[in-house]
Image (spheres, rainbow, N blue to C red):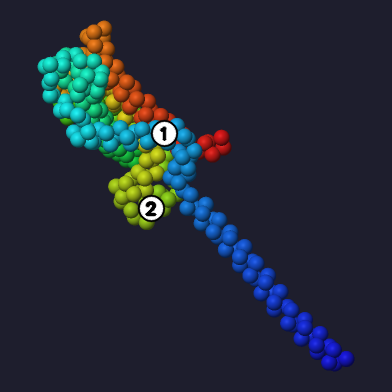
Amino acid sequence: MDVIAAAEGLHSTGLEPDAGAAGAGAAGAGAAGAGETVARARARGPWRKAWDRFKRNRLALISLVMCGVLVVVAFAAPWIAPHHYADTDYEALLAGAGADGHLLGTDQLGRDILSRTLYGLRTALIVAFGAELLALLCALVVGLAAGYRGGRAEQGLMAFTDVMYAFPSYLFAIVMVAVLGRSIFALIVAIGIAGWVTQARLVRAQVLSIKQREYVEAARAMGASGPTIAVRYILPNAIGPMLVTTSFAIPAAIAAEAGLGLLGLGVQPPTPSWGGMISEGTRYLLSAPHMLLAPACVFALALLAFTWFGDGVRDAFDPRGDRR
């Protein structure tokens, strides 16, 4: 009996460590799996989620590719254009599409329409991106200062913003071009200064919301200076809405540049501008319609591409997109 009891005791003690080790291993594996799940959830931050939403939008992806192609073509215009935009062929005045050496024809001075359209794309994107960069810098400075400082600084800055908002932006751009002259630099300054007001209001609203959050209060309690808090803790969390407004402001700036060119206030000839080319094309609409069709079609394509891209960015930063 003693031998049997001892054997049973050894058998039971031999089993219990194995069962305990298996249970501990299962618990450890479960904890490790839970930790990996939490790590993956933390890794999917707001930027990763926005990109995932953007990728699910096929139209947004197509527009992103289109915008990339337009930017590359604009950058490479001096190398891929068959002619310089100012070269003239007096033997092919108002030549139609498919003429020898001129795929899209020529204008009233014998200049190649395709080359001028490509250079017009270059002008439009330089003005649009430059103007939006200037508008964004003005909006960040005014919005951050007004939202974070508060008090009289906020009242003064927002009063100035309201005055600028009350003034018609397009009329302001016309006045600026008339004062500064017809050049790419003048167009960038005119369109940029005329378009920063709405973005400044958005930045201020974001700053007022973010500066009350716990991590900002913690940084303030640890002795971080005001500029450090504004630039390091507040600004990165306000970029999302700013990207949305910027993506819509770029096609608006392209349209503004073309509109000023249509009024004769664009870049100085012979530098091509889509607005100027469309204006010239309307004069020869019946005798040479290719002068109008080429720049108008590329202008419409660029506006559609950047507008669809803006729609995709807006939807990407909309949290409700996860529930659709």
Instruction: Indicate the position of residue 82 as horizontal and vertical percent values.
Output: 19, 29
| Residue 231, placed above or below residue 12 | above
Residue 221 location (% of width, % of height): 38, 54
Q: Quadrant of the N terminus?
A: bottom right
Q: Which is nearer the eye, 51 or 205?
A: 51
Quarter of the image where one finds residue 154: top left
The first of marks 2 and 1 along the sequence is 1
SS state under label 1: helix
Residue 281 point in image, percent of width and height: 23, 13
Residue at 53% x, 36% y is 320
The residue that label 2 is drawn on is 219
**Camera sees residue 291:** no
Residue 286 rendering spot, x and y as whole percentages: 26, 7
Q: Are marks 2 and 1 in contact (CB under 8 Å)?
A: no
Along the horizontal axis of the image, is 152 left or right of 50?
Answer: left
Q: Is residue 277 above or below residue 236?
A: above
| Mark nearer the viewer, 2 or 1 | 1
Task: Give the amino acid at mark 2.
Answer: Ala
Closest to the observer, 144 or 35: 35
Q: In this view of the protein, can residue 49 be seen by the observer?
A: yes
Quarter of the image that includes the C terminus: top right
**Few, some or many residues within 10 Å of mark 2 (<14, 14–19, 20+):** some
Q: In whole angstroms, how far apart are the C-alphas of marks 2 and 1?
A: 42 Å
Give the label on residue 249, or none: none
Q: Residue at x 42, y 36 (%)?
A: 61
Query: Disc 1 designates what residue?
Result: 62
Side of 127 relative to 15 (left or right): left
From this view, report whether residue 88 is shown above or below residue 135.
above
The amino acid type found where label 1 is placed reads Ile
> Is 3 left or right of 146, judged from the image as shown?
right
Q: Picture quarter containing residue 35?
A: bottom right
Secondary structure beneath dot 2 equals helix
